[in-house]
Image (cartoon, rainbow, N blue to C red):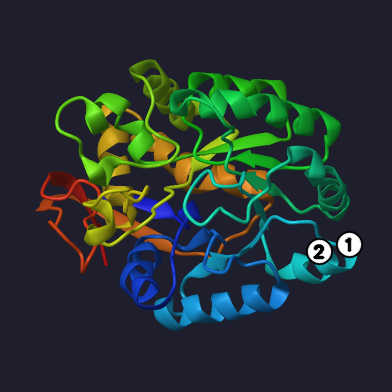
Amino acid sequence: MLILHSPMDMHVHLRQGDMLALVAPHTARDFAAAVVMPNLTPPVTSLAQVLDYRQEILRVTGESFTPFMTLFFRAYSREELLAARPHIIGLKLYPAGMTTNSEDGLADMRQANATLAIMEELGIPLLIHGEGCGFVMDREAAFLPVVREWAGAFPRLRIVLEHVTTEAGVKLLDRFENLFATITLHHLFITLDDVLGGLMRPHLFCKPVAKRPEDRDALRRAALDHPQAFFGSDTAPHPVTAKEAPGCAAGIFSAPVALPALAGLFEELDALDRLQAFVSDRACAAYGLTPMARDVRLERSAWTVPQSIGCVVPYLAGQSLDWRVVD
């Protein structure tokens, strides 16, 4: 038996409407809390939208789960952010057009400074989809100079490089005490070769794209040991009709398998005793959180991941896992 105390997923996409009702219970079953992304249609850009979306989530999940809410980054006034601060965990910045529903994101990073200064003053963290323009494998590297600039210019602003995918991104954590990173489940397992090396596997296509084996290995080392790296699944469901189609949607639905697959990986790496830090303790330290007390139990018991959950194909569909969450 493995007991995790208040595990948290620090990056989830819960969607809206029927998709929310389908996927949110899987996150709420296995995690005490999660950081909810704001790239909806339309994006979450006001306190009223934050409060409405939070209530929509809780109607599905119940009160034993805490959705940590975020605002979609735009130019905000101090008054707006002061009013929103008690209800959000941070602002999520998307470069324009870099991922799903990011068309309203920031096109010129220089326009962020005024809002970043207010966030630093008020103690509101910045969460970043850290990709710039250019060749798809180099987009995270292209954005790292922006991260370095902001981390240096705003030393009291907590910055989270979401779903870090490169060895260079991990190394950047060592340069700034105010810089943190989330690491996904799938980037701990796959490389680009898994997606495109044989027949294309659309259900492994995500953004940022999976990178090289050496990048995956750097992420594994950080997951085990780096105090500024913690778990954020970036679980991002799309219906099978959007995945197995021209213009394949980017996103991997990993919520149903996140903790069992992590337990298997950490056991394989002889590091089960470090899973608690990765899925809770480091995030609590980074954000100054005290999550609701809730123990989640896993047992060694083989099970097969279903081929589909409603209209969505989950990560590791059809594969056998050695650990399962016990109610």
Most foreground residue, 156 or 190: 190
Percent across and percent down for residue 191 are: 31, 27
Question: Is 320 rendered above or below residue 60?
Answer: above
Q: Is residue 52 above or below residue 87?
A: below
* Residue drawn where x is 59% and y is 37% of the image: 130
Q: Is 15 positioned to the left or the right of 44 in the image?
A: left
> In the image, what residue type sits under mark 2?
Leu
Residue 189 visible in the shown view: yes
* Separation (CA) of disc 1 from disc 2: 5 Å
Residue drawn at (76%, 54%), measured in percent from left and top? 124
Helix, strand or loop at label 1? It is helix
Which residue: 36% across, 32% down? Answer: 188
Asked if the residue at tag 2 contacts the one at tag 1, i.e. Cβ–Cβ closer than 8 Å, the answer is yes
Label 2 Cα neighbours within 10 Å, binned few <14 / some 14-19 / many ≥20? many
- Residue 47: percent from left, percent from top: 71, 73
Dot 1 alpha-carbon crowd within 10 angstroms: few under 14, some 14 to 19, many 20 or more: some
Relative vertical location of residue 59 with respect to residue 86 in this rendering, above or below:
below
Nearer to the camera, 313 or 303: 313
Q: What is the count of numbered marks?
A: 2
Is 266 situated left or right of 62 in this image? left
* Residue most extreme to the top: 214
Amino acid under label 1? Arg
Q: Quadrant of residue 79?
A: bottom right
Quarter occupied by residue 193: top left
Q: Is residue 119 left or right of residue 106?
A: right
Please give the residue where the numbered disc 2 appears in the rendered image: 81
The answer to whether residue 75 is above or below residue 54 is above
> Is residue 173 visible to the viewer in this orientation of the structure?
no
Q: Check the picture and name the quadrant holding the C terminus.
A: bottom left
Q: In the rendered image, which residue does mark 1 sit on?
A: 78
